[in-house]
Amino acid sequence: MTAEKTYVAIDLEPTKAELGVSSPLHITVTPPVKIEDGMLGELTDNLREAFHSLHPFDVVGGDTDQFGPHEEPVLVRKIVPTDAIRAVHALALGVMQQTAPDIDTTYAGERYKPHSTFKNGYGLGENERRTVDHLTLLRKVGAEWTRIAQFNLAGTDEATA
């Protein structure tokens, strides 16, 4: 089976057990890709290896913005760009490109603009600081979202969700 979307994110709701039809509040790290079930193991292993030596870092909420078509824009919180989040993006993007070379990089690399979603009016606040101690591989198949893997930073072991 091919997922509609698979991507690396900073999960801002790690204690939300069931995702269902809604992705968790998150900061997108890589563009989404369509990936076959058979490639998930390789992707997870490659991400685990790449992230193993990363250390926790902070993210800070910036201004709000709207993304998407003007008829249905999506409200997002910009994330203050830092060397740390750009390095994590570049590292994760490199791994994703190895596994899914057809990844759409229109808004990646130099054009990457870190941002957080809002869910039911809730989201990261302006100037709110969060320490990122893990990254998450999210996947959507049909209408259902799942956490495929959680990658704890600072060389700790991976714990799958």
Image (cartoon, grey):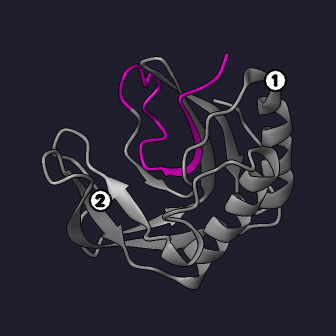
Q: Quadrant of residue 54?
A: bottom right
What amino acid is found at the position of numbered circle 2 in the picture?
Leu
Q: Position of residue 117 (x, y in %)?
A: 32, 51
**Residue corresponding to mark 2:** 124
**Magenta stretch in the rendered image:** 1-22
Local crowd size for mark 1, using a 10 Å CA cut-off: few (<14), some (14–19), many (≥20): few
**Residue corresponding to mark 1:** 38
Residue at image location 87% in from the left, 54% down from the top: 49
Residue at image location 38% in from the left, 63% down from the top: 115
Q: Quadrant of residue 79?
A: bottom left
Magenta stretch, main secondary structure class: loop
Q: Residue furthest left?
A: 71
Vertical position of residue 140 compared to residue 28: above or below? above
How far, Cα to Cα, is label 2 from label 1? 35 Å
Which quarter of the image is occupied by the N terminus?
top right
Between circles 2 and 1, the one closer to the viewer is 1
Q: Is residue 87 magenta?
A: no
User: Label 1's element?
Assistant: helix
Residue at image location 47% in from the left, 17% down from the top: 142
Residue at image location 36% in from the left, 29% down from the top: 22
